[in-house]
Image: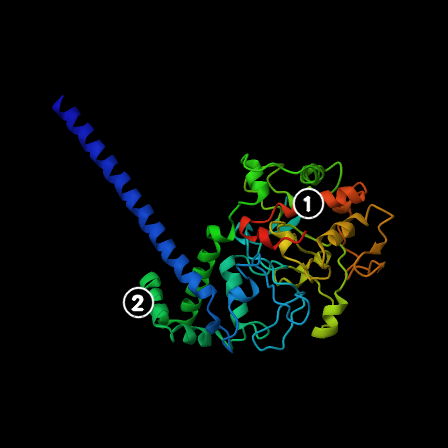
Amino acid sequence: MKYSSLLVLTASALFFTACTKTNIAKEDLAYEINKKENLGKVLYFDKNLSKNRTQSCATCHNVEAGFVDDRNNGVSSMASLGDNGTSIGDRQAPSSAYAMFSPEFHYDKKKEKYIGGQFWDGRESTLANQAGGPPTNPDEMGMSSKKETVDRLKENEYYISAFKSIYGNDIFDSNEKAYKAMTDSIEKFEMTKQFASFDSKYDRFLRGEYDLSVLEDLGRSIFFSNNNNSCATCHVLKGEDKEGETFTNYEYHNIGVPANTKLRAINGVTKVDEGLLNNPAVSDIKQRGKFKVPSLRNVAVTAPYMHNGVFSDLRTVVEFYDKYNNDERKINPETNKAWDKAEVEETISLKELKAKKQSDRKIEALVAFMKILTDKKFEHLIKE
């Protein structure tokens, strides 16, 4: 009897100890993550990590403007201006909001499609890898090397202390390791709730905290109806009215976007943007001209639109989609001319674009619905 009691007591003690150690481990892990998040936040806003000390991550991913580059840049915000003050890109800087949910870049054999990654062509698999690109890109932040970037880090006593505290006293013995630690911390910051608040009017509607207007409710019904249009084909991952929906399936498609001739008249680019085919991991010519399906969260406050900023109004985007199914949509409302031809025509996703034609009322409703996908902190930016 005493032996049995001793076994019970011993087992209980071991169980309690194991649980305690697990809790401590979880607390330690949370503490370490929090330290990385705090360090990442400082790094995210630090302009000293660009050659001329004029540009930070936040410059092109403004936390007060839907996490995109809201500067005019002399091109009506169609692309970003580099730290050198002269380089103009050929694509828009994607929003860093909700980017944490994009899976690592991979090929789905079942779907026979490429999925996930970061950037418009998925060329970086993770947020950390993405964060490591702009600092040493000569057309962006302009640092000549990882070493030069790390040397800038070592100018700051806070960085020296924080990096050693988090990553070890020898972290600066290797420029490669220090640079990787920098991108790791930025990634941790970009994975905080600040970048994915899920508090839009749509989210509040799902929680019973907001009543949709008649137009918003109509737009919602149309959006999720595969019998009516094709929005949900690419912009729904979890299903109708599911919490945590990011409004993208992270696939790559060519929807026939025309080249942005206004932008290219300024940046001087003449080469066709081959989209996914520019990804070093992709060699299949059938992927030419495909771009990652973006999240529709905050879409109403992150104009201009498409990977190259060719359209300035959200309604124009919806009409552009409708032109594939509606013979009456022959004119681009922004130019009052016929729609320009696709930059890459041979790989357009015609199957996914197939839908019923939309009336003006339905287009207004879809735009109204997309407006309620705006994070609460950005709602004041919506233009009625």
Residue 368: which disc?
1
In this picture, is 16 found above or below 250? above
Q: Position of residue 229 (x, y in %)?
A: 75, 41
Number of dots carrying numbers = 2
Q: Position of residue 261 (x, y in %)?
A: 76, 68
Asked if labels 1 and 2 touch by Cβ distance under 8 angstroms, the answer is no
Q: Which quarter of the figure has residue 133?
A: bottom right
Residue 271 shows in this picture: no
Residue 21 shows in this picture: yes
In this picture, is 375 found above or below 132? above
In this picture, is 78 found above or below 323? below
Residue 169: which disc?
2
Q: Is residue 310 left or right of residue 5?
A: right
Q: Nearer the viewer, residue 120 or 123?
A: 120
Residue pictured at 69% horizontal, 62% vertical: 309
Q: Nearer the viewer, residue 121 or 111?
A: 121
Q: Nearer the viewer, residue 218 or 104?
A: 218
Residue pictured at 43% horizontal, 61% vertical: 40
